[in-house]
Every structure is written in structure tokens, then in C-alpha cells.
Image (cartoon, rainbow, N blue to C red):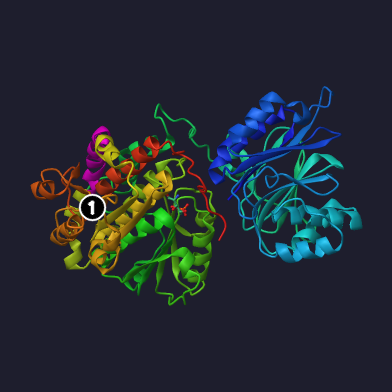
Amino acid sequence: MCGIVGYVGNKEIIPILLEGLHSLEYRGYDSSGIAIHDGKVLSVLKSVGKLSKLEEILKNDAGSVNGKNGKNEHVYCGIGHTRWATHGEPSDINAHPHFDSDEKIAVVHNGIIRNYQEVKDKLVKSGIKFLTQTDTEVIVQLIAKYLKENNSVLSTICKTVSDLEGSYALAILFKEKPDKIYAVRKESPLVIGLGEKENYLASDSPTLSRFVDKIVRLGDNEIAEVTKEKVEFFNTKGEKINKTVQKVIKSKDFLDKRGFKHYLEKEINEQSEVISNLLNEFLPSSDSKVKFDHLKLKPEFLKNIDRILILACGTAYHSGLIAKYVFENLTSIPTEVQFASEYLNIKPLLSEKSLVIGISQSGETADTLTAIKRAVSCGATLVGITNRADSALADLSKERLLISKAGLEVSVAATKTFTAQITMLYLLAIYISEILGSTERNNLKPLKQELRLIPRLVDQTLTRAEYYQEQVLKYANKRDFVFIGRGINYPIALEAALKLKELSYIHASGYASGEMKHGPIAVLDPNVPVVSIIVPGETYDRVFQNSLEAKSRSAPMIAVTVDGDKKAESIFDTVLHVPPVTEVMSPFLTVIPMQFLAYYIAEHLGRDVDQPRNLAKSVTVE
Ligand code: AGP
């Protein structure tokens, strides 16, 4: 987490750094700060809280850090940071950039230094005083110590990083080098943007796409020396290296809310268009086969898969749980879904016949990347599903299914990328099933017809937003929520609980409905609504029975079911209807009233809907 930006050139620097930080705020918003060299003075300005706080401070007093030193043709040089706190509480003092004790070096950092305490102890013994609780201060103090010893910036950086364990993307300013930014990374992203007589750096390429057409991705253990005229690259032995220049993928203006109050509301409402775009590309008609022509998976491999392992976190994990039902039903291949963070402690029982599916909207989630590396080290084949073509997951996966057509998701809570992921997973299950081609599985046409109808049904569901709002706000002041479902809608119960928690801060749990009687039913009382995802089909009667059990414990009862479900209407206090749909396709629809429930309750409670407290969009630390 944390976002880094940097600029060297002749343009006014503060608007550039702020624009970059706005685009990176999804990576953390506990504090922000900038460091600027004006040719003589190296200054830092930082503040706890959202970027808007820093902007306010700058509006009132930009004089000290505007980078102007009175010359006409002046080179502006500066770095900025937006923080998601790991070491040390969010505060002014712990905000980046960090100075060394002599205020001659300023550093911004994304990542975690695992051995920081050990390094800090040594530095403290040598007389260095620390001001902050961050692991980053260790880096800047270490740089200062080594610079005094050897006087060369490049070898100082090489020596410093050789002492560090963990992950880092660093941008560094030196008082003695007024027009240079140094950057180095390991396991945290950093991209250099190449302009005309100006150069940039940032934690992601969409941010750079606002300023430049060409980028260079810094690799692990690589250093960049960025000046206005050129960028030079080195390895951590200090040797010069060549890097490939890439064209940046220009993203649409993702910071446009298109008239919606929040990005979240906009992104929920984009879901039918997103699914439709994906289907038009990969399943243009129910008569066609799934067009994953870019996948190089050999039919012999697909026919002999011994097991499928899906690795993901959070909402992406929930899309994996839905996929398990679809894969096992269509292909009969045993499919397991693991939290990526848990997989780090599990013996990987995989072989060259196994298929690993890694799902991550950001493609940068550290837990997911580490788990995937562990899984593929057994010889398994990886298919990565992400909507960031420029991400670490995309780089790692030779076989990838991109959902970039979903467009960037700005709101921290995932909505449209969830439905985009499940669209791709349904398509992948159909694709494998078509290759397996057994008679029993051959009749995929009805399923493809249903899938092709989903965008229209999602659209119809979205038009019911106002009705959902009116119904769910009756429950906005409840203490806890319990969501229940079975089979393919159990993951929707989990997703609904996650969405409500992260957006509204109300405690919520998702349960397989049959599990309620094994303990969780004890929490029910009139202050704890139960939301049953109850769609006609195989699981209906059992979820209904479990809902009656909850109702007998005085819980207010809400159902998500299809239009015309009179049985549900007779026992539930509130019914959130979706258009009629088969059970297998129902998650595409049942998730929508759940996203609205979380959104409207959070908005009613005055929460920061797009940037909930304590969260970040990309979780790049384990
Ligand atoms: C979703 O609303 C969450 N913010 C979070 O659980 C997220 O899904 C998880 O961190 C995984 O992110 P990824 O898809 O980028 O890997």
C-alpha cells in the first residue's frame, strides 16, 4: 500500500504532485506529504488525514515548499506520498516524506522493512536519534550514515538496500543533488514516466498516463537516477543496465463520477455494461464457443487436470467460491478455493497436472502473489484473472484473463470487478467444459443462453435502486447483521457481510444457513436482522427452513428472492426482489441488492463511502 509520485522538470511542481497523489489515493489515505528541492533548500510538508488536508495547508502557505528559487529557467524536483499506516499510527510525524537527522535526505517508501527493528537498534547504538515510529525512518537514517562514509549516492543506495529485508519502493531526494530523484524497488511497484525534458515516477502506470506516453517499469533490485534530461538505470551492484521502454495504456478519465454521488454508486451501476462488454468479446452468441483464443492451454493438459486451486483474498475470494460450484458442476474437476494468506501455511499438494487460478482486481495483492508463487513452484499451470494489465499478477501469468474492460475501479470496495470476475470464471468453466466435450457436458447451450441474458437482468435489477434504498434504510440503526445463504449463494452471504462491514462499520457475518443452528443463532435478537439469500432452486426449502428458525428468535427478517415469491413474502418482514433467474445464474443478481444495502446504509450513517477508514484499494503488504 502507499502511493509514491515524483517529478523533475520545468513545470510548476505542486499541482503535478497533487494530481499524482489524487490518482494514487486508492493506495492509502492515512496521511500525505511532499518534499521539494528548490535548488538550495530541501523542504518537506506533510499532514495526517486525507490529501484534501495537505491541499488546504498548501493553499494557505505554499511559500515554503513551492520549489521556486527565483531563477527563470528553474528545474523543479520533488516527490510525494500517500500513506496506509503499517508501522506507527497515522500522524503528522509518521507521515512521509521522512528526513534524516541532518535534513539533507528525504525519502518516501511503499512496503515493509521486516528487519527494521534490528537495523534501528544498530543505528541507535551509533548515536542516531529517531523521531518517528516508522520503518521508513530506518532507511533514510541508514542512507545518511552510509553517505557520510563513502560520498557516492549510487553506492550508498546499493549498500543501504543490501541491509534491508522486506519490500520497498523508494524515491529519494538528496540536498546535494538538487535536480535528481533516485528510485529503487523490491517487491513493491514503481514505474518511471518519460516525458519531453521532464520525467516522472509513480507507483502505477495509470497515474503516469495522465502526464506521459512512455514508461519504464523498474524491476526488483533496480535503481533509477531521474533527471529532467534523462533517466539512467543501474542494478544494485551499481552497474548500468538497459531497460525496455513501453507505451503507456491510456485509461479513460477514471476520476469522473459521471453524475453519481460516489464512485461506488457509479461502479455498482456500471455492472450490466461491464458484463455485456465481456460477453460480447468472449461469448458473442449462445451458438458460439467461448473465445479465449489467447489462452495457450493445451487440450491434453485441460483433459488431464487433477485439481483446480483458486487463490484470492476478500471479494476476489468470494468470486472464487462461486466458481467452485460452476467448475465442479460443469467439469467435474475437484476445485478448491483458498484464502491466499492462509495458503502460505498449507502444504501445496499440487502437480504438473494442476491448474491454479489467481484472482485479484488490482493484480498487486501481496498475499495473492506470494501464494501463487508457492503454488506454481510445484509445476502447476497458472491462469491469472485481473483488471490491471500492467500489474504484477498480469506479469506473472503467461495465461491471463483480463477484465480491464470493467474499467478502473476507484472506490475501495469492489463491486463491478466482482461481477466481472465471476463472468470470466463462468466463461472459463464453459471453455474447459467445451474442450472436455463429454456428452453429458455437451449441452452447454441453455447455460450460454442464460449467461447472455444476464446483462439485461442485471440492468433490470439496477433500476430497482430506489426501492432497495427505501427498504434497507429501515434497518440502518441495527447493531449487527447476519447474512445467510446456501450453495452458490453462500458466497453472496459472505460478500454481503464484507461489503456492509467495510462500508458502514456495522458488524456483520455471513453464514452457510445450515450452520446457524450450530452456534451463530445465539446472537439473534430484535437488534440483529437476518438477511436470507433465498432463490428458487435446490437450496430454497432448506434456506427457508433456516430462516424460520431465525424468525422464531425474534430477528427482523429480510429476504433476497425473485419476483413473485409469495412464500417468502409471507414470512419475511422485508423482501428485496430481483428478476426471475435460475439458481446457477442468481449470484449475478442477488449481489446487487446487497451492494445497495451496504451503500445506502453507509451513506445514511455519513460514512466515507469511497474511502472507508483503515482500508486501501491495493493491499501490497502481507
Ligand atoms: C473488497 O471490497 C475489498 N476492499 C477487499 O476485500 C479486496 O477484495 C481484497 O483486498 C483483494 O483485492 P484484490 O482483488 O485487488 O486482490
Residue 248 is at least partly visible in this image? no
Q: Which residue is at a point 21% across and 56% down the rendered structure image?
A: 584
From the image, tell me which residue sits under label 1.
555
Q: Nearer the viewer, residue 491 or 514?
A: 514
The segment highlighted magenta reads: 451-467
Q: Quadrant of the C terminus?
A: bottom right
Q: Which residue is at a point 84% across and 23% down the rendered structure image?
A: 70
Q: Nearer the viewer, residue 4 or 119?
A: 119
Residue 105 is at least partly visible in this image? yes
Q: Nearer the viewer, residue 504 or 272?
A: 504
Above or below residue 328? Residue 603 is above
Please state if 92 lies on the left or on the right of 619 as rendered: right
Q: Position of residue 403 (x, y in %)?
A: 41, 48
Q: Amino acid at mark 1?
A: Ala
Q: Does the magenta portion include 496?
A: no
Count of numbered circles in the view: 1
Q: Give the quadrant of residue 129.
A: bottom right
Q: Which residue is at a point 76% across and 50% down the rendered structure image?
A: 131
Q: Position of residue 295 (x, y in %)?
A: 40, 58
Q: Position of residue 356 (x, y in %)?
A: 42, 66
Q: Which residue is at a point 20% across and 64% down the rendered structure image?
A: 441
Q: The residue tagged with tag 1: helix, strand or loop?
A: loop
Q: Position of residue 286 (x, y in %)?
A: 21, 49
Above or below residue 68? Residue 494 is below
